[in-house]
């Protein structure tokens, strides 16, 4: 009973703030709403008996990534820029495409989604279990991902630091 | 999840104790800060209101409440108003996973003509003993950036924006070093639970078969490096003086809270001191043995619990005093030095230290 109350409260919060993200005009408010939405999602992980994933969700998404987003938005200091008026054909195409997508999504969800009860046993999501899995069964993909990320970082440095003569760590 | 009224009542009691203690930190620390700075700078400090100026904090609080609350016309009203609350939230909640005393068994309490705890029950003095313990601390610490950043941006003031941007850059940079430094203590304990970290530190190191030292992490040579990195990063994370670039009076007026007045400013003020208190409890738990009393084996009774809580408070107070001491002794760094220090000194040191501690554990030296 209690779990349902928590679930529906945080599900509602997540959905409402996700809507604020796309509907609000101020990008800073959007970014902050996304943080709230991510935080409510992490509560879902707690309800699923996966506190480790919940905490990672907050650290990685709500903490690290969104701080960078907010940082960039604030530095650019986006104002309410008036967008050029869209042509009728563009509006028509936009509405049709999104309607088609929505109908398809609902159709496939109803057709293929399986509404079953929660899995009975707890997930094995303790930090030690995840660590053992990462460094034993999945050690090769894990190392590949780290190399990929390193390549991405080097690429980003190369792309952004081309014009500057000295590349210090910028604030 | 079955509802157990006794469990809920105990949790409420624990939350009340911790929150009251945390809320009382601010007035006491304001007094310590002002009198301590006066002591260090060889002047009397506030000594008029009450004995030793002890009631100065009440006067301050009264002043905060009575001042006019000004919202700048060009500010973003919504964000400007909620920013202090966003800043206060992580500072208030982080302490939930820190153990503040030795657990003991409750039984047979006679109250209001009824007997409680006929079934003996273990009382754990920690609000949430979750198995991801310290990660919760870092998750909430990563959210504490938002209060400062949003305050700086929504004020619509150049100095505020600079303060907010500097603070967020600084907190992101030092968070990494802080996390990596904490890893060594966790490695030694083999657990993410902070209560396990404390249990690991009860006991003794015996030097030359004669000298008994408490087995606190700060007495273990492998931990010294990580302790230094953790404490320095903790100073940076809480925006305390050698690293208080968020408000650097000399260059930014008052940084991110330039435009704030009255109770909104007071919330930032409280948040800063609570974050400091939380950081002190973390330093105590990870490196100074938590609630362990040296050379004394606390019994698992109410007395042992009380003594351990007092020991914990004493240690936290000492760390808090060091915060004040450092603030009035070491001048502010330059901003580029701060960033260079964070990325090029403390981060590599923390990584090296993890390898060192792992080696020590592998060899069985810890």
Image (spheres, helix red, strand yellow):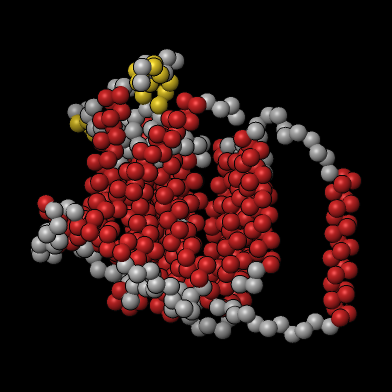
Q: Name the quadrant containing residue A101.
A: bottom right
* Residue depicted at 33% across the width and 22% down the height: B300
Q: Name the quadrant containing residue A134.
A: top right
Q: Residue B232 at what x, y percent from top left?
A: 33, 57
* Residue depicted at 72% across the width and 34% down the height: A118
* Residue depicted at 66% across the width and 57% down the height: A16
User: Relative to A88, is B274 on the left or the right?
Assistant: left
Q: Residue A160 at what x, y percent from top left?
A: 59, 77
* Residue depicted at 35% across the width and 21% down the height: B111
Front residue (pair A67, A149): A67
Front residue (pair A115, A9): A9
User: Relative to B66, is B39 on the left or the right?
Assistant: left
Q: Residue A62 at what x, y percent from top left?
A: 57, 57
Front residue (pair B46, B285): B46
Q: Quadrant of the C terminus of chain B?
A: top left
Q: Quadrant of the N terminus of chain B?
A: top right
Q: Is residue B168 visible?
A: no
């Amino acid at each position: 009973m209690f779990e349902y109350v928590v679930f529906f409260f945080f599900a509602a919060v997540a959905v409402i703030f996700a809507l604020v993200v796309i509907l609000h005009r101020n990008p800073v408010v959007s970014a902050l709403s996304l943080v709230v939405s991510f935080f409510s999602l992490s509560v879902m992980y707690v309800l699923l008996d996966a506190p480790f994933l919940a905490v990672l969700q907050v650290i990685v998404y709500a903490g690290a990534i969104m701080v960078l987003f907010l940082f960039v938005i604030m530095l650019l200091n986006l104002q309410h820029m008036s967008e050029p008026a869209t042509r009728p054909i563009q509006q028509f195409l936009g509405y049709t495409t999104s309607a088609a997508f929505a109908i398809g999504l609902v159709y496939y969800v109803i057709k293929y989604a399986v509404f079953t009860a929660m899995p009975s046993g707890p997930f094995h999501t303790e930090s030690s279990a995840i660590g053992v899995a990462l460094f034993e069964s999945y050690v090769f993909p894990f190392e590949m991902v780290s190399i990929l990320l390193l390549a991405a970082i080097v690429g980003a440095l190369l792309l952004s630091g081309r014009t500057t003569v000295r590349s210090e760590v910028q604030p | 999840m079955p509802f157990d009224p006794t469990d809920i009542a105990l949790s409420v009691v624990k939350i009340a104790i911790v929150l009251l203690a945390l809320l009382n930190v601010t007035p006491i620390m304001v007094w310590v800060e002002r009198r301590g700075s006066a002591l260090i700078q060889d002047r009397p400090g506030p000594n008029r209101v009450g004995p030793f100026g002890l009631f100065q904090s009440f006067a301050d609080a009264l002043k905060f409440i009575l001042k006019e609350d000004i919202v700048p016309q060009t500010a973003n009203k919504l964000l400007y108003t909620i920013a202090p609350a966003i800043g206060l939230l992580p500072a208030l909640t982080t302490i939930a996973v820190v153990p503040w005393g030795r657990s003991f068994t409750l039984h047979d309490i006679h109250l209001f003509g009824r007997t409680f705890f006929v079934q003996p029950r273990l009382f754990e003095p920690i609000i949430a003993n979750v198995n991801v313990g310290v990660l919760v601390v870092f998750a909430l610490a990563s959210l504490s950036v938002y209060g400062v950043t949003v305050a700086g941006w929504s004020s619509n003031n150049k100095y505020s924006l600079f303060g907010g941007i500097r603070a967020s850059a600084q907190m992101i940079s030092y968070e990494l070093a802080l996390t990596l430094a904490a890893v060594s203590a966790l490695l030694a304990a083999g657990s993410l639970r902070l209560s396990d970290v404390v249990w690991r530190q009860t006991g003794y190191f015996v030097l030359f078969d004669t000298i008994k030292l408490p087995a606190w992490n700060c007495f273990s040579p492998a931990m010294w490096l990580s302790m230094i990195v953790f404490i320095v990063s903790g100073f940076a994370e809480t925006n305390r003086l050698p690293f208080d670039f968020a408000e650097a009076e000399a260059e930014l007026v008052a940084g991110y809270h330039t435009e704030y007045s009255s109770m909104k400013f007071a919330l930032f003020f409280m948040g800063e001191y609570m974050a400091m208190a939380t950081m002190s409890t973390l330093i105590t738990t990870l490196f100074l043995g938590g609630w362990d009393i040296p050379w004394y084996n606390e019994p698992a009774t109410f007395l042992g619990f009380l003594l351990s809580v007092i020991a914990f408070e004493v240690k936290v107070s000492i760390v808090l005093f060091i915060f004040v001491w450092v603030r009035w002794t070491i001048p502010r760094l330059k901003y580029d030095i701060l960033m260079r220090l964070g990325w090029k000194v403390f981060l590599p040191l923390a990584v090296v230290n993890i390898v060192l501690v792992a080696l020590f554990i592998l060899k069985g030296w810890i």
